[in-house]
Amino acid sequence: MDFLKLSERAMGMDEASWQRHANPWSVLSRFSILPLLCLAVWSRAWLGPAWLPVALVLVWTWFNPRLFAPPIYTEHWGARVTFGERVYLNRAEIPVPAHYRRWTTGLGALAGLGLVPMAVGLWRYDPGLTFGGLVLSMGAKAWLCDRMAFLYDEMIDKDPVYRGWMRKRSGG
């Protein structure tokens, strides 16, 4: 099993939570998770053990895709990102173009690489390392999200289920 499938299972993502996660507020607010995690870990300087703040960030991570209502229209970037993630997770059943697999691997590795200086910075209370790693990791993740939107655009006609996720505004 790959890491992405494992993470989907750990998050308990079902059809309802995926539909809710297609809300642009859900997608955009997920970008708060890594900075909040940094703040939670850094809070040990002020609060002592950071278990509670870290636990709250983990609860937010799980709760976020369930918080917002499913969007009425799904033409926006955030929904296409979410749908692209689903298409990528389904790549064993319906193959995706090889360049998307390379982009996902490369950008995922770059995002993971950014976690190294971020973690060292958090350990040492070094704002430069922490921020640099955070920017590298989040930048790679944002770029990967954009690739997922393009993946969905390319794969929308490969399966009727994929096409059914798109809900356009009537008359426009």
Image (cartoon, helix red, strand yellow):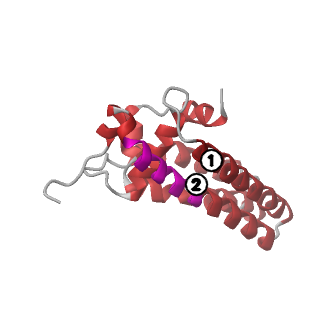
Disc 2 is placed on an element classified as: helix
Find the magenta span and give its range: 142-156
Q: Nearer the viewer, residue 161 or 125?
A: 161
Amino acid carrying label 1: it is: Thr
Residue under label 1, please give it.
104
| Residue that lies at the very extreme toward the left in this rendered image | 171
Looking at the image, how many numbered discs can be counted on the residues? Answer: 2
Q: Position of residue 52 (x, y in %)?
A: 65, 49
| Residue that lies at the very extreme toward the front in this rendered image | 98
Residue name at image x 72 percent, y 50 percent: 109
Residue name at image x 32 percent, y 47 percent: 69
Q: Is residue 38 magenta?
A: no
Residue name at image x 60 percent, y 42 percent: 98
**Visible residue check, residue 48:** no
Disc 1 is placed on an element classified as: helix
Cα–Cα span, label 1 and label 2: 6 Å
Q: Residues within 10 Å of mark 2 (few under 14, many from 20)?
A: many
* Marks 1 and 2 in Cβ contact (< 8 Å): yes
Residue under label 2, please give it.
144
Q: Position of residue 161 (x, y in %)?
A: 34, 32
**Visible residue check, residue 54:** yes
Q: Nearer the viewer, residue 157 or 40?
A: 157
Name the quadrant containing residue 139: bottom right
Which image quadrant: the C terminus?
A: bottom left
Considering only vertical position in the picture, is 85 above or below 130? above
Q: Residues within 10 Å of mark 1 (few under 14, many from 20)?
A: many
Q: Is residue 150 magenta?
A: yes
Q: Position of residue 66 (x, y in %)?
A: 41, 43
